[in-house]
C-alpha cells in the first residue's frame, strides 16, 4: 500500500502528536497530562485497528505491525493506570519490533521498485528527526542526572519530533509533473 493512499493517516498523526504533547506535559508536570496521554494511546489503538481492518491485502508484515501497535498502546495504557505487569507488553513490543525490522526494516522508506526516494529536502527532514531523537535521549539523560537545562532540551527534542510528524499535514500537496491536456498515445 503506497504511503499516499493509507487510510486514516492524518488522524493517526494527530494522535501521535497529541501523545508527544502529553509526554511533554507530563515532563513539565502540567495537570491532566495523564488524560491526554491515555486518550492519545487509546486513539492510536482504535485508529490503527480501523486502518488494519480496512486494508484489503494483508501480508504477514501487516499483522506484525498490528500486533506491534497493540502491544505498544496496551503497554502505554496500562502503565498510565499503574498496572504492575507491563513488562509482558514491553517484551512483546520489543519482539514484534525486532521482527518487523528484520522483515521490512529500511525498505519501508523506499519506493515500490526499491529505489530510495529521498530528495534533499527529505534528507534534511530525516536529519532533523535524528537530531530530535538524539535531543530527547540526551535531555532524558540530563534529567536523570539532575543537570540544568534538561527540561528545555527535552522540550526542544519533542517539539522537533512533533513537527516532523505533522510536516506532511500542513505542507502543500506535491504537484505532479503531468499535464493531462497534452497526453499523447504512442503506438
Image: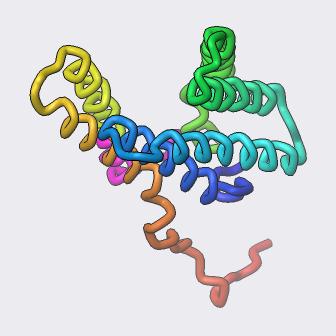
Above/below status of 183 relative to 172: below
Q: Position of residue 83 (x, y in %)?
A: 64, 18
Range shown magenta: 116-128
Which residue is painted at 55% across and 38% down in the image?
109
In the image, taking residue 72 as reference, residue 166 lies left or right, namely: left
Magenta highlight: main SS: helix
Residue 130 image-quadrant placement = top left
Quarter of image, res 41: top right
Q: Quadrant of the C terminus?
A: bottom right
Indicate the position of residue 74 as horizontal and vertical percent values.
69, 28
Furthest residue in direction bottom, as rendered: 181
Q: Residue at x 75, y 74 (%)?
A: 186
Which one is in front, 131 or 4? 131
Residue 144 place in picture, x, y as percent = 25, 16
**Horizontal and vertical percent for residue 161?**
38, 43
**Residue at point 45% right, 43% down?**
33
Seen from this angle, which residue lies furthest front?
31
42 sits to left or right of 157 = right
150 in relation to 30, above or below: above
Horizontal relation, residue 81 to residue 152: left or right: right
Q: Which sits in the foreground, 75 or 84?
A: 84
Residue 20 visible in rendering: yes
Residue at (39, 38) in percent of width and height? 26
Residue 97, placed above or below residue 156? above
Q: Is residue 120 magenta?
A: yes
Amino acid at each position: 500500500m503506497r504511503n499516499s493512499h493509507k487510510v486514516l493517516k492524518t488522524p493517526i498523526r494527530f494522535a501521535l502528536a497529541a501523545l508527544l504533547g502529553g509526554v511533554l506535559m507530563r515532563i513539565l508536570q502540567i495537570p491532566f497530562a495523564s488524560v491526554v496521554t491515555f486518550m492519545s494511546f487509546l486513539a492510536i489503538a482504535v485508529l490503527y485497528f480501523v486502518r488494519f481492518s480496512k486494508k484489503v491485502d494483508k501480508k504477514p508484515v501487516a499483522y506484525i505491525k498490528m500486533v506491534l501497535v497493540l502491544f505498544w498502546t496496551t503497554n502505554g495504557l496500562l502503565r498510565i493506570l499503574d498496572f504492575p505487569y507491563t513488562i509482558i507488553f514491553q517484551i512483546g513490543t520489543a519482539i514484534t519490533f525486532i521482527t518487523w525490522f528484520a522483515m521490512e526494516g529500511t525498505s519501508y522508506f523506499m519506493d515500490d521498485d526499491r529505489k530510495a526516494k529521498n530528495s534533499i529536502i527529505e534528507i534534511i527532514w530525516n536529519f532533523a528527526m535524528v537530531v530530535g531523537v538524539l535531543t530527547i535521549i540526551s535531555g532524558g539523560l540530563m534529567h536523570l542526572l539532575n543537570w540544568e537545562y534538561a527540561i528545555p532540551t527535552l522540550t526542544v527534542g519533542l517539539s522537533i519530533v512533533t513537527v516532523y510528524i505533522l510536516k506532511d499535514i500542513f505542507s502543500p500537496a506535491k504537484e505532479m509533473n503531468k499535464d493531462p491536456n497534452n497526453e499523447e498515445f504512442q503506438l
